[in-house]
Image (spheres, grey):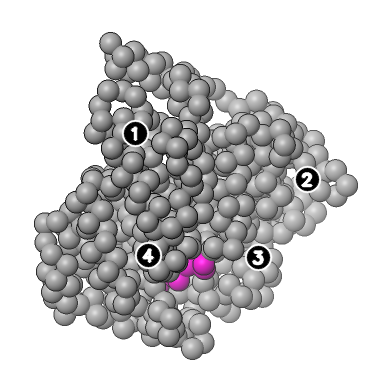
Amino acid sequence: MKKCLALFLSLVLVLSLGSSLADDPPLKQALIDAAKTLEPSKELYFENGLEISAMGMIFNNYPTEFDGCYLWPAVEKLTNTRITVDWRVEDNYSTQVATVLASGKLPDLLTAGAYGVSNLVNEGAILELDEYLDLIPHVVAAVGEDRMAKWRQADGHIYTLPTIVNVPGSQTVMVRKDWLDALGMSEPQTWEDWIALWRAIKANDLNGNGDPNDEIPLALEQGATGERSMASLLNAFGIRASSDCQFCVLDDGTYTMVYEHPRYPEFLAAVRDLYAEGLIDQEFATRTQAELFTIMDSNKVGTCMTWAERCRISANALRDLGDEDALWEAVPPITGPYGDQMTQEREAVSSVWCITIAAKDKIEDILRFFDWWFAEEGNNLYNYGIEGVSYDMVDGVAQLKPEMVSNGFVDYRQSGCEFEPFGNEWQTNAFMQCLFAGQPMDALDAPSAEFYSGLAIINNGKYYSMPQTIATEEYTEYRAELIQTGVCTLRDQCIAGQISVDDFFASYKTLKDRGLQEVIDAGSAAYALLSGK
């Protein structure tokens, strides 16, 4: 009966959330109407118009149609530029790019995705931008001199237009504080403390549903392609991994794969033991991010590492289901057996658009548009919307209307602000206003305060700048076969006890002989070129 009631309440919550998400944000239509009345920009206006076609990846439920939000009509009214994007989903995106290339009908802009910028370069499909940097000074300034290496590709050249996020925090380790309290335990400080906590979570029916075996002490996620599932534990062993957890830079400055790190054998053995004892997610190899969120909201997870905003979202979901004391507490990174405590800094510079050879005759106009897009007028449009409608200027600082941020990032993004799939530079001011939902810090409820802590407080001083996953030709060629379904699968089999640690490294050596060593060597050479070492 108790389980049936929980299922019923869950269904009611899902239906109510679906209904609320279907409703337009308060100012969405007002922004669209205002966009249609804008006067031409004094900074940039193409008298004869500029048409830009593009194919890219959409995500996070951003509006896809031209009239779906204020952004594209506003761009057209201000600059007389019409941008038509063929939005595709991430699944099988590489195949979709290959199909477009084979057709010979390229758009002006193309997101490379997993297909790889280097492959597009080799096929002569995109244009090098090095000689045009003087046309995009605002883009160059947004990247910054100290981050130029992360904008360049493996051959040292620039082929992409970036997106910039100047906020170091993104993900955090988090613990169910109410479960900690129920156990009479304090926030873990050492590796031994963490193991003791995971054992206590496993040994107790903390969600009170009568099933002593459904709590997950440390939940993990595989990432989009299965590569990333061990980020929090790699960090605990002092392995400073790339975003996909496949590459690292050793203490002597060597760029290589994480499997070459001197502590990796010990890491693998330790995680294997945690799995055997049932302390880490038994479905780590297949659990997607969406599934992680579901089990968090289903009262089954004791600790995890994910986006800091889940501190608020998941706690509120649990409270809505009747668990009034539910609270996810953002805590510092897991401390490893050697005392290492670190976490990945958000990747500030990401590649978005390549300009294809189809746009060769109008590349300068396209770059002029993107320089306007990264300058004050375009940047304000991206971050804040339309002055007087979604924000006001107060003492020279943009202040978003309460209606835009009262629901945090949700209404803000659904209205079209910070349209991440298209990219620009997300201003810290806009980010913080969404984070605080328009409230002063002391007015935040407990879940929101933990969200803020995980994003901007608790991890300070523990970030490391992630080494790049350098998309060399070798990496692009062998990624699917030798990394995603190769060494990652071997890693998962070893952790699950299907093969030994020695067997893992023997098979890993075979993969190196089949081409993985070429990936390592090419990455090392590219790293030396990009870093000037």
- The Cα atoms of the two marked residues, 4 and 2, are separated by 46 Å
Q: Which residue is mark 1?
A: 300
What is the crowding at mark 3: few (fewer than 14 residues within 10 Å), some, or many (at least 20)? some
Residue 507 in the image, given as x and y percentages of width and height: 13, 71
Task: Please identify, in this view, whether the residue under mark 4 or under mark 2 is nearer the observer.
Answer: 4
Q: Which residue is mark 3?
A: 142
Magenta segment, prevailing SS (helix, strand or loop): loop
Q: Quadrant of residue 515?
A: bottom left
Q: Which residue is mark 4?
A: 337
Discs 4, 2 touching: Cβ within 8 Å: no
Task: Please identify, in this view, whether the residue under mark 3 or under mark 1 is nearer the observer.
Answer: 1
User: Would you say 442 lies left or right of 463 here?
Assistant: right
Task: Please identify, in this view, whether the residue under mark 4 or under mark 3 is nearer the observer.
Answer: 4
Q: Is residue 468 magenta-colored?
A: yes
* Residue under the point 63% across and 42% down: 435
What is the crowding at mark 1: few (fewer than 14 residues within 10 Å), some, or many (at least 20)? many
Residue 53 in the image, given as x and y percentages of width and height: 50, 52
Pointer 1 or 4: first along the chain: 1
Helix, strand or loop at disc 3?
A: helix
Q: In this rendering, is residue 294 above or below 197?
A: above
- The Cα atoms of the two marked residues, 4 and 3, are separated by 39 Å
Q: Amino acid at mark 4?
A: Pro
Magenta span covers which residues? 464-470
* Residue under the point 31% across and 14% down: 2
Q: In this rendering, is residue 82 above or below 161?
A: above
Q: Amino acid at mark 3?
A: Ala
Q: Quadrant of residue 365?
A: bottom right
Q: Which residue is mark 2?
A: 398
Pointer 2 or 1: first along the chain: 1
Discs 1, 4 touching: Cβ within 8 Å: no
